[in-house]
Amino acid sequence: QLNDSEATRRELHEKIQNLKGNIRVLCRVRPPVVNESDRSLCNINYVDEGTIELRNRENHKSEFIFDQVFPPEATQMELFEDMAGLVQSALDGYNVCVFAYGQTGSGKTYTMQGGQTDSTVGMFCNLYFSYKYSVDPLISMSSVTNGIIPRSMDLLFATINKLKKVGWEYTLQVSFLEIYNETIRDLLDNHPKHHEIRYNEGKGVTVTNLKIQPIASVEEFHELMETAWKYRAVASTNFNEHSSRSHAVTKIYINGVNSESGLVYRGSLNLIDLAGSESAKTSSDERLQETKNINRSLSALGTVILALSNKDNHIPFRNSKLTYLLQSSLAGNSKTMMVVNISPLDECYGETMNSLRFAFKVKGVNINARRNKTYISPTE
Ligand code: ADP
Ligand code: MG
């Protein structure tokens, strides 16, 4: 019976995911990029698959333990292995949140979206990749540097096609929004509107006036994403600066119905490229206010995730737009993954330590049961 094996598969998947825990924190160190070849690098040691050790100039050592640590040479594909299970969970009715955290330039957008494939370096990587994995260079061209978002969409649609054969009919919808200075902007609507976050027991969190579009194929998704990103660029005077100071939230709404059993699954994938976590370096009042808002929302996020992993009774969702928006997706039937991106540059040591401390705090104490090791407190 197809449906029996389908049920067994789901049960097994659920068991594996539960063993992994509902909140996973990964750390990724990006490689130096082309114009950084002459900069000095941090002294980083990859102790084991989950342990990273940093030394400052005085050779003082700080060690941090995560669910997994990805060194600079880790590929997008390797990083995605961890994510693939979460895509399946979203199809099985879970709300999944994936965050890219880190200072500007640490690789958040690369992790979520991916890198450019039109550079000479990109071409070389692709050719090397196609040689190493014996795949058609033309196929690997577009995909080797693809990040979590495009890879999740490919896997979603591929899995939905498979599930059709066992009676599942899935429909997907998408919304793109950003939170800039505690204000929500719909990236699929070029007529700016006012948006409020509403909470309702039955429906959970909704955003007023938000465009939610159906998507029937990967191509349709990419078309909408392109529209959203163009609008984000057009609506800001300095795109790079703006994008590093806003949280970009891509949400996939997933609805599955089994025609035979009548079973219904409602899940979602929330993919979030967070604003840069760096501390303020500027004197302008406007910038300072922005930085305050960013820091407040990032620390609210940290507090919420920690409270959830501690199973606290009161979870302070309403302390920021970001956590309020994600309330239904973070609580209850949910799975969360945070990728903490860090730069390899020595000049970023201070921010890197801040990011690692934040991530370590978020992870809580109860997650890493599998590692039988004493922990040395990461203070300077
Ligand atoms: P952020 O979004 O955190 O500001 P980016 O994702 O834009 O940072 O990364 C900064 C630069 O580093 C970009 O040129 C990006 O392509 C490159 N980069 C980041 N991570 C990697 C990686 N893992 N491999 C190769 N290049 C990377
Ligand atoms: Mg970015």
Image: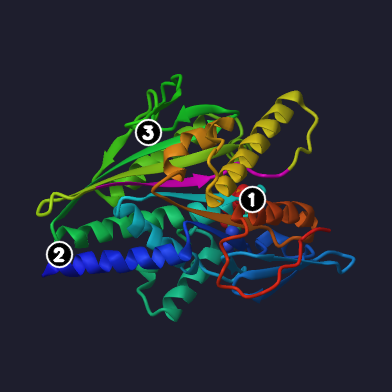
Q: Which residue is mark 2?
A: 3
Instruction: Please state the horizontal and vertical placement of residue 254, each as a whole percent of the image.
Output: 29, 46
Give the amino acid at mark 2: Asn
Q: What is the CA distance from the residue labelled 2 to the residue labelled 3? A: 31 Å
> Mark 2 vs mark 3: which is more N-terminal?
2
Residue that badge 1 annotates: 102
Name the secondary structure under disc 2.
helix
> Between marks 2 and 1, how big is the CA–CA gap?
43 Å
Instruction: Find out whether residue 269 is within the magenta segment.
Output: yes
Which residue position is annotated with label 3? 204
Cα separation between marks 3 and 1: 29 Å
Give 224 or 356, whichever is nearer the viewer: 356
Picture layout, residue 146 above or below residue 299: below
- Left or right, 22 with respect to 307, comes to left
Q: Nearer the viewer, residue 160 or 18?
A: 18
Is most of the magenta stretch helix, strand or loop? strand
Label 1 near label 2: C-beta < 8 Å? no
Q: Amino acid at mark 1?
A: Gly
What segment carries the magenta color? Answer: 265-278
Report the residue at 52% width, 64% height from top.
122
The structure residue drawn at horizontal position 67% and vertical position 38%, both measured from the top left corner, is 295
Q: Is residue 285 found left or right of 366 in the rendered image?
A: right
Q: Quadrant of residue 19?
A: bottom left
The reply to whether discs 3 and 1 touch (Cβ–Cβ < 8 Å) is no
Point out the tag, 3 or 1, that comes first from the N-terminus: 1
Residue 135, given in percent of the width and then of the height, sits at: 36, 75
